[in-house]
Amino acid sequence: MNQSLSPYSNARFIAIRLIPGEDALLTLRHKIEQHGLQAAFIASSVGSLTDVALRFAGQEETFQTTGKFEIVSLIGTLDAKGEHLHLAVSDEQGQVLGGHMMPGCTVRTTLELIIGELEKVNFIREPCPLSGYEELIITSR
């Protein structure tokens, strides 16, 4: 099942900064809604977290931990009703932990983001019988 459309679309970008204490995922959801973004993606991210909440591959439960973490990668797609984001963080010893980003990731010092939006398509999510999860569907605007 291929959900691809035309390979080309212009993009526009917004820059945002999340501040200490904010839940990164919940704030991102709010910003997507606030700016009316329909086919967004994380173009760049840098920051740190005190609380990390991840779902690991093949697991249903959310793993949570607290400490001082640097974000080494935050990638994925977002739309008005959902997102698919993967987060990797390193702890104070440089150990890396990563998975599907869940609510409960609290900003420690800052989270600086450049969010892009494809202008010619919409992203929606629908249940996929193959994966068992809501997956990305790409439609023309």
Image (cartoon, rainbow, N blue to C red):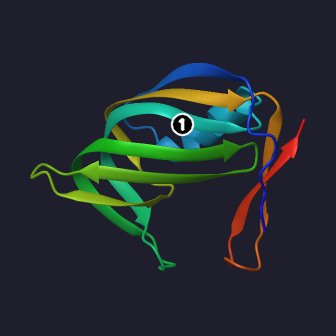
SS for callout 1: strand
Placement of the N terminus among the 4 image quadrants: bottom right
- Up-down: is 59 above or below 109? below
Q: Residue furthest right?
A: 141
Q: In the shown orientation, is residue 137 left or right of residue 50? A: right
- Up-down: is 135 above or below 14? below
Q: In the shown orientation, is residue 137 left or right of residue 117? A: right
Q: Residue furthest left?
A: 93
Q: Position of residue 61 (x, y in %)?
A: 47, 77
- Residue type, numbered disc 1: Ile
Q: How many marks?
A: 1
Residue nearest the viewer, comparing 46 with 130: 130
Q: Position of residue 99 (x, y in %)?
A: 41, 62
Q: Position of residue 50 (x, y in %)?
A: 29, 46
What residue do we see at 47% from left, 79% from top? 59
What residue do we see at 47% from left, 54% from top? 86
Q: Which residue is mark 1?
A: 42
What residue do we see at 30% from left, 43% from top? 72
What residue do we see at 77% from left, 30% from top? 36
Placement of the C terminus among the 4 image quadrants: top right
Label 1 crowd bin: few (<14), some (14–19), many (20+), radius 10 Å: some
Q: In the shown orientation, is residue 118 left or right of residue 97? A: right
Residue 7's image quarter?
top right
Q: Position of residue 84 (x, y in %)?
A: 59, 54
